[in-house]
Image (cartoon, rainbow, N blue to C red):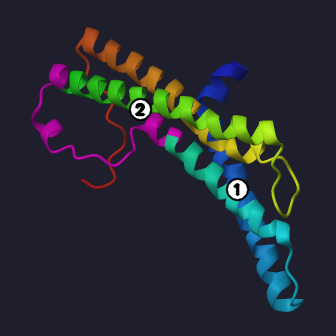
Amino acid sequence: MTLLRKLDQNAERWLLLTFYVMLVITMAVEVLRREIFAYSSIWGEEIVRYAFIYLAWIGAAAAVKERAHIRIDVIMHYLPPRPKALLYIFGDVVMMLVAVIALYWSYESVHVSAKFGSVTDGLRISKVWFLMAVPTGFGLMIWRLLQSMRRDFTSLRTGKPVYEGDTLFD
């Protein structure tokens, strides 16, 4: 497997793991500091907050990849493969339009933050690094939607069943 293929398959997983571990360790350290030493840092809460924001947006992209977003799929169980694929493609196109618009507008806050040089209160790091979570998430979503549409068009062309993701409940 090439590096790019491994990155494509596991990028969100590794990013989610990194931010989750960072969040849990920082939170545990801060709780211990607060309870044992009666002292807490100003930066601990910020790290947890921004790690959670990255978790949410990267997780949204991972959910697009796995078709794991919440949806009502009762109708899909009764459709043959071709109309089912068309409906999934339609849903991906609508989500793509929303993601492109959101990506465009999410850069506004990043641009303003960079222009005025705003920094976080505790860490004193440029807010651009943390505000980039939203455009990063939407960028990953767009990439995953393009992959999903390609997969669905292939299923539509070959007549194979469309990928529906793993079911949570049977």
Instruction: Pick the residue in front: 166 or 67.
Output: 67
Residue located beneath label 2 in the image? 98
Residue 120 has which mark? none
Label 1 environment density (alpha carbons within 10 Å; few <14, some 14–19, many ≥20): some
Does the segment drawn in magenta span residue 76?
yes
Q: Is residue 14 visible?
A: no
Residue at the image position 57 percent from the left and 30 percent from the top: 139
Q: What segment carries the magenta color?
A: 61-83
153 left or right of 37 in image: left
Dot 2 or dot 1, earlier in sequence: 1
- Which residue is nearer to you in this view: 16 or 170? 16
Q: Amino acid at mark 2?
A: Val
What amino acid type should be assigned to the residue bearing mark 1? Tyr
Alpha carbon distance from label 2 to label 1: 24 Å
Work out whether residue 3 can be spotted.
yes
Q: Quadrant of the N terminus?
A: top right
Closer to viewer: mark 2 or mark 1: 2
Rendered residue at 28%/55% (across/down):
169
Residue drawn at the location 64% of the way across and 49% of the way down? 54
Residue 50 bears which disc, if any?
Answer: 1
Seen from this angle, which residue lies furthest top?
Answer: 157
In the image as oriented, which residue stretches furthest toward the front? 116
At 78% from the left and 38% from the top, the residue drawn is 114
Q: Is residue 32 left or right of residue 52?
A: right
Q: Position of residue 145 (x, y in %)?
A: 44, 26
